[in-house]
Image (cartoon, grey):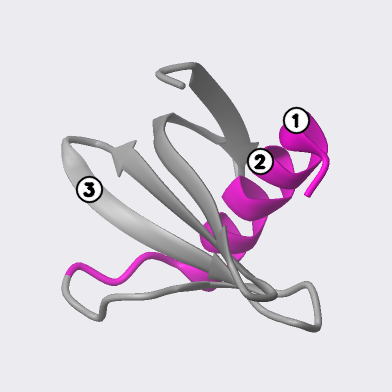
Amino acid sequence: MGQIFTIDLAGSSFHFQLIKLQQVDRIVESQILLQGTTVTLCKGDKGDWMQKENSNPIVKELVQAIGNSISLRYRI
């Protein structure tokens, strides 16, 4: 993977790199590198994205925007 994405949210630009993308049963897990921190995002059955770990929480709107960007790029 290794592709770098840019998200513009609330007047700020965020850059993240997709490290790993996998599907386990019906749940999609995406491991990204965001501002020097590795974060795992999960897409549930309802199509909503959430952060898997609770350390270094990210704003929910940013998680959703990153997840949507990954979904559109990789058609998941």
- Assign the magenta stretch its main secondary structure: helix
Q: How many labels sit on residues?
A: 3
- Where does label 3 land, which residue? 38
Identify which residue, 16 or 70, lies in the foreground.
Answer: 70
Q: Amino acid at mark 1?
A: Arg
Q: Which mark is residue 73?
A: 1
Identify which residue, 76 or 57, lies in the foreground.
Answer: 76
Task: Provide residue 51's location: percent of width, then percent of height.
Answer: 42, 71
Q: Earlier in the sequence, mark 1 or mark 3?
A: 3
Residue at image position (70%, 40%) is: 69
- Confirm or deny contact between disc 3 and disc 2 (CB under 8 A): no
Q: Secondary structure at mark 3?
A: strand
The magenta span reads 56-76
Residue at image position (30%, 38%) is: 33
Q: Amino acid at mark 3?
A: Thr
Q: Would you place residue 60 above or below residue 3 in this image?
A: below
The quarter of the picture where residue 59 lies is bottom left
- Mark 2 residue crowding within 10 angstroms, few (<14) / some (14–19) / many (20+): some
- Where does label 2 land, which residue? 70
Q: Would you place residue 16 above or below residue 20 in this image?
A: above
The quarter of the picture where residue 56 lies is bottom left
